[in-house]
Image (spheres, helix red, strand yellow):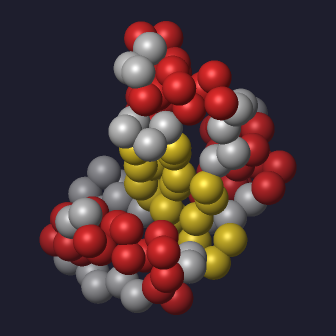
Amino acid sequence: MLLKQLLEKGLKPAIFSIFNYIEDNGYLVEWENVSQEKFSIDDLEYIYFQLPENIKNGLKYRNKEITKTFNEFKFLIENKIQFDKNKPKTMVLINKDNGECFLINQKSFDLISELKNFAR
């Protein structure tokens, strides 16, 4: 479901609410510290995954199977697709409290092409 949405809808330029979320929650500083680069909103793109209510509730109430699926997706993107583990280019953020998930990517990294190459 998540991969399908990502491949079909692609990524959009980051918006202030997404950028502010990663900044306010410390993800941006963490990312900048690890990669030793500074990022602005113009450097990033994102997808906010559309989730059915039962999946949102599964995340909120920590359903083991649903949580496992999201964690496996996060692992695939963050650990298998990216080549340089010291300079991460993509983050998958799973907000279990609100039952939502989104992905932030550096525009310099062509995530969609890498996913297609990985699937071959």
Which residue is at 49% across, 38% downward? 99
Counting every numbered tag in the picture gives 0
Q: Quadrant of the N terminus?
A: top right
Question: In this image, 86 relative to 68: left or right?
Answer: left
Judge whether 41 appears above or below 113 on screen. Answer: below
Which residue is at 83% across, 49% downward? 8
Residue 40 in view, yes or no: yes
Q: Position of residue 97 (x, y in %)?
A: 37, 39
Quarter of the image holding residue 71? Answer: top left
Residue 28 in view, yes or no: no
Q: Quadrant of the C terminus?
A: top right
Q: Position of residue 13 (x, y in %)?
A: 63, 78
Q: Position of residue 58 (x, y in %)?
A: 51, 21
- Asked whether 70 or 36 is in front, the reply is 70
In the image, farthest residue toward the left: 33
Judge whether 61 appears above or below 8 on screen. Answer: above
- Asked whether 112 or 101 is in front, the reply is 101
Judge whether 92 appears above or below 36 on screen. Answer: above
Which residue is at 44% across, 43% downward? 98
